[in-house]
Image (cartoon, rainbow, N blue to C red):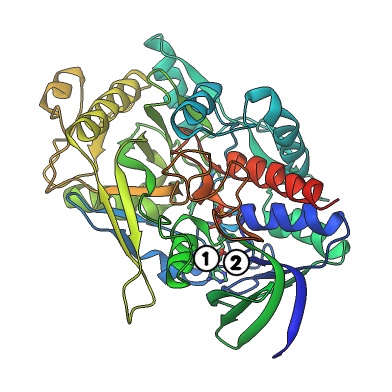
């Protein structure tokens, strides 16, 4: 393998890396995608299962951002990255958020009308559509409750297509852009972790476990934790990982008087945007295993939940506040990830949790179990007063699946790349993943990751036409 050369190497096969790789390969470039994780044939592992966690998640899903409170987070680690395991809920970046990024980060070329063609392409590539059948009963309950309170609710489209038997199948990189990338001559190499990137004369040398490769251009697309780690370990981009954005969730388990999560019912698709983009409300996957885990702070409820799991559903309140960092630790494979939530963030989480409980009571829930140590059980409107005004630091049980903003793009001094993903001071080195988003977008981020990756890849091609 020593002496191998490619025109473009892409490090990481998640939505950001594969979107760029596909655009470049379809324009005739020689592209090799290097992916640390395994290649898992689509459909070979049940979705949202323990097997999926063991195979497709980094560290089997056991990762934490240190702080007070700590935030548990997960990253996909397989060909296709997070797209292989995620919920498939799609949003464009809200216009107001794009305005903030232009104002605060000097981000150029990202007005809503400039991004629209890229979002349209992503929507077509993934088959973004509203759920064909009736949404899950747990989703309808949240929507009904919020509507009864006069709050703004949206049914969020997802990336879904029907299979030959007419069954809806969640789309992912391995079902969409990776086959296209391969058809265009691009290659994906699994089980190939890059540990260092360095410049040698006019090329980049990529080193890793069983790997040495030269490339004219490199797109770093390892996701918001791994990309800054690789850049810093390589002695490139000293500002990479100095900041990190998480959309942080607190969960509530709800018990209803009849089944709301019948076997096979999908992920809830309704989200409450009344306080968006600062605070959002929605629903999570609620298999019996997920419900049991979420009830860890209410062990007395477990026997009933195990006996009648279909009466339980899991919901969340999510905030986009706080600030973190990703730092290499000498001698360790994983970085030190830290996250700090200030008083306002904890108050937002508490406010979101209270709103959520109010909406679920209005939607017919008979008992609510907020997921933090010592939380009261909420059985009626009077119990809402027992919820705190701020989530208690030592007891909060927080979680994130939306990791962003560790290598923000733009022309501002805090930015790691220019407005189109090129790492400052590094000819031919680009970032192409969720790290680039200047701040957490306040919505599910994969649509934003892909739209910016496509826009930046087309810009790269234009510059070399
Ligand atoms: C459980 C879950 C549910 C989610 N639900 C939604 C949702 O409903 N809607 C939505 O919009 N978003 C959702 N997300 C978030 C979404 O999946 C991510 O925003 C998206 O995957 C980020 O894409 P990315 O390209 O930045 O990185 P990733 O998807 O993280 O991909 C990075 C890839 O790079 C590989 N890699 C890392 N470092 C190296 C290295 N050094 N060498 C080689 N390879 C490397 C990793 O193994 C990984 O496969 C969810 C995420 C999770 C985990």
- Is the CB of mark 2 within 8 Å of ligand 1? no
Q: Residues within 10 Å of mark 1 (few under 14, many from 20)?
A: some
Task: Tell me the residue at 29%/28% (across/down).
Answer: 352
Q: Which mark is residue 52?
A: 1
Residue lying farthest to the front in this orientation: 201
Using residue 58 as the reference point, say whether residue 121 is left or right of it: right
Quadrant of the rendering where the N terminus is positioned: bottom right
Ligand 1: which quarter?
Answer: bottom right
Front position in the image: 250 or 91: 91
Q: In this rendering, does residue 430 appear at all?
A: yes
Q: Position of residue 110 (x, y in %)?
A: 62, 31
Give me the residue at 54% from left, 28% from top.
Answer: 98
Q: Nearer the viewer, residue 361 or 303?
A: 361
In this rendering, the answer to whether 137 lies above or below 3 is above
Q: Where's residue 386, x and y in %?
A: 11, 27
Q: Say which label, 1 or 2, has the lower sequence index.
A: 2
| Residue that carries the numbered disc 2 in the rendered image | 45
Q: In screen coordinates, is 91 left or right of 249?
A: right
Closer to the camera in the image, 103 or 294: 103
Q: Which mark is residue 130?
A: none
| Residue 393 percent across, percent down from the top left | 14, 44
- Dots 1, 2 in contact, CB < 8 A: yes
Q: Residue at x 43, y 66 (%)?
A: 232
Query: Does the closest atom of ligand 1 sit within 8 Å of the Cβ of label 1?
Result: no
SS under mark 2: loop
Q: Is residue 164 left or right of residue 407?
A: right
In front: 318, or 300? Answer: 318
Q: Residue 411 placed where, x, y %?
A: 52, 39
Determine the residue located farthest toward the top in the rendered image: 150
Instruction: Work out whether residue 167 can be spotted.
Output: no
Label tally: 2
Q: Say few, some or many: other residues with alpha carbon within 10 Å of mark 2 (under 14 / 14 to 19 / 20 or more).
A: some
């Amino acid at each position: 393998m020593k002496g191998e050369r490619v025109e473009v190497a892409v490090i990481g096969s998640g939505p950001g890396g594969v979107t760029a790789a596909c655009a470049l390969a379809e324009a005739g470039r020689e592209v090799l995608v290097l992916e640390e994780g395994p290649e898992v044939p689509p459909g070979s592992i049940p979705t949202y299962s323990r097997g999926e966690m063991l195979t497709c998640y980094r560290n089997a899903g056991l990762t934490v951002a240190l702080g007070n409170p700590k935030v548990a987070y997960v990253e996909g680690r397989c060909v296709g990255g997070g797209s292989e395991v995620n919920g498939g809920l799609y949003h464009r970046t809200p216009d107001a958020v794009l305005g903030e990024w232009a104002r605060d980060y000097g981000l150029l070329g990202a007005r809503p009308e400039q991004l629209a063609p890229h979002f349209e392409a992503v929507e077509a590539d993934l088959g973004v559509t509203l759920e064909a059948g009736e949404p899950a009963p747990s989703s309808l309950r949240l929507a009904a409750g919020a509507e009864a309170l006069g709050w703004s609710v949206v049914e969020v489209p997802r990336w879904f297509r029907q299979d030959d038997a007419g069954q809806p199948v969640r789309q992912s990189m391995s079902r969409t852009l990776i086959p296209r990338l391969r058809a265009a001559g691009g290659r994906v190499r699994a089980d190939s972790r890059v540990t260092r990137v360095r410049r040698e004369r006019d090329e980049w040398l990529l080193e890793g476990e069983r790997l040495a490769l030269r490339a004219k251009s490199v797109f770093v697309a390892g996701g918001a934790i791994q990309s800054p780690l690789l850049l810093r370990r390589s002695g490139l981009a000293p500002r990479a990982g100095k900041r990190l954005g998480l959309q942080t969730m607190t969960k509530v388990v709800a018990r209803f008087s009849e089944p709301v999560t019948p076997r096979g019912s999908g992920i809830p698709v309704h989200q409450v945007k009344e306080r968006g983009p600062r605070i959002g409300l929605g629903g999570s996957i609620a298999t019996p295993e997920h419900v049991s885990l979420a009830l860890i702070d209410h062990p007395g409820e477990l026997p009933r939940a195990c006996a009648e799991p279909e009466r339980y559903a899991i919901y969340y309140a999510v905030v986009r506040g706080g600030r973190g960092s990703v730092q290499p630790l000498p001698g360790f494979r994983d970085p030190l990830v830290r996250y700090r939530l200030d008083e306002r963030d904890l108050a937002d989480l508490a406010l979101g949790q209270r709103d959520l409980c109010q909406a679920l009571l209005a939607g017919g829930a008979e008992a609510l179990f907020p997921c933090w140590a010592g939380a009261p059980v909420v059985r009626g409107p009077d119990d809402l007063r027992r919820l705190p005004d701020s989530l208690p630091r030592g007891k909060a049980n927080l979680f994130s699946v939306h990791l962003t903003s560790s290598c923000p793009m733009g022309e501002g001094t805090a930015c790691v790349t220019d407005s189109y993903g090129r790492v400052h001071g590094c000819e031919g080195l680009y970032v192409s993943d969720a790290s680039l988003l200047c701040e957490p977008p306040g919505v599910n981020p994969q649509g934003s990751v892909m739209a910016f990756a496509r826009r930046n890849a087309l810009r790269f091609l234009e510059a070399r036409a």
